[in-house]
Amino acid sequence: MNNEAGANVKVDAETIVETMPNGPLLVYGNVTVKDASGNLSKKNNVTAFCRCGGSANKPFCDGTHKKIGFEG
Ligand code: FES
């Protein structure tokens, strides 16, 4: 990986992405998430990413979408 989004990234395995109605984006597979500061965190199996914008733990879902009645 480098600092440009998507540039020089080698993909070794197929990943499934599922949009949950009124909820997060689920990514099935083993992924590495790089934050804006360049910190990497590895996630395995299923990772839920926030789509509602309300999570206190972005980019991950923390369940806030239910509390705020997110529709989308
Ligand atoms: S989608 Fe779950 S907190 Fe935003």
Image: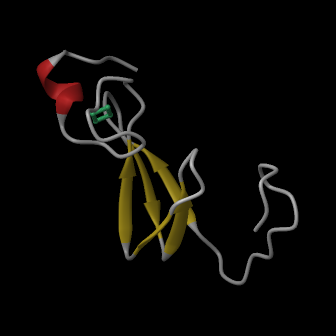
Residue projecting furthest to the left: 67
Q: How is the image coloured?
A: secondary structure
Task: Please state the horizontal and vertical placement of residue 6, each as a whole percent of the image.
Answer: 79, 55
The answer to whether residue 51 is above or below residue 69 is: below
Could you say which quadrant of the image residue 62 lies in?
Answer: top left
Task: Please state the horizontal and vertical placement of residue 64, each as a whole percent of the image.
Answer: 19, 29
Report the front residue among 52 and 7: 7
Residue projecting furthest to the front: 37
* Left or right position of 70 against 52: left
* Left or right position of 54 against 66: right
Could you say which quadrant of the image residue 70 lies in?
Answer: top left
The answer to whether residue 6 is above or below residue 69 is: below
| Residue pictured at 16% horizontal, 27% vertical | 66
The answer to whether residue 13 is above or below residue 20 is: below
Could you say which quadrant of the image residue 45 lies in?
Answer: bottom left
Task: Please state the horizontal and vertical placement of residue 19, each as a whole percent of the image.
Answer: 45, 42
Q: Within the displayed image, which quadrant is ligand 1 positioned in?
A: top left
| Residue pictured at 79% horizontal, 62% vertical | 2
Report the front residue among 2 and 51: 2
Quadrant the C terminus occupies? top left
* Left or right position of 43 against 13: left
| Residue pictured at 39% horizontal, 76% vertical | 44
Task: Please state the horizontal and vertical placement of residue 42, each as a whole percent of the image.
Answer: 45, 73
Residue projecting furthest to the bottom: 12
Quadrant the N terminus occupies? bottom right
Q: How many marks?
A: 0
